[in-house]
Image: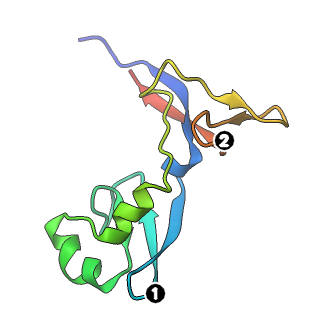
Amino acid sequence: MPDLTIQTAWTCETNQHFRTTVKGSTGKTYVVTLSPHNQGPYVNNWECNCPHFQARLKSSGAECKHILQAYRKHCGWNASLEPTLEADRCEDGTPCCPECGGNVVAVSVAI
């Protein structure tokens, strides 16, 4: 089996650093966080500070409704998974995400 080759690829910054607030049905605001490394209490890389997630869902591996709402705010573009798309150029000439127009970061990918 050949060795893996390490290459650099662009990914939307939301894949590395994503935290958002989501308003619950009672009007209270909850913090939803994405961990790209799936460490600690995260379920499928996501965590919510709502009582339902903390008390029941975290151990079951299920997402709460706040995490499902946060999915809609999260871009998630990754050039290594979508090789036909390349990072766009923002007005200042720096690379930016072709999906949401946000910042991109370079990541190492083994192929």
Quadrant in the rendering for residue 2: top left
Quadrant in the rendering for residue 61: bottom left
- Quadrant showing the N terminus: top left
Inspect the image, locate mark 2, and give the three-letter code of the amino acid beneath it.
Answer: Gly
Q: Residue furthest right?
A: 92
Asked if residue 110 is positioned above or below residue 105 in the image, the reply reads: above
Q: Residue at x 40, y 63 (%)?
A: 69
Q: Position of residue 102 (x, y in %)?
A: 65, 45
**Residue 77 in the figure: left or right of residue 26:** right
Q: CA distance from mark 1 to mark 2?
A: 30 Å
Asked if residue 58 is positioned above or below residue 70 in the image, the reply reads: below
Asked if residue 58 is positioned above or below residue 28 in the image, the reply reads: above
Work out whether residue 93 or residue 1 is closer to the camera in this orientation and state it: 93
Q: Position of residue 90 (x, y in %)?
A: 77, 35
**Residue 90 in the figure: left or right of residue 79:** right
Q: What residue sits right under mark 2 in the picture?
A: 101
Determine whether the residue tagged by mark 1 lies in a helix, strand or loop.
loop
Q: What residue sits right under mark 1 in the picture?
A: 27
**Residue 30 in the figure: left or right of residue 99:** left
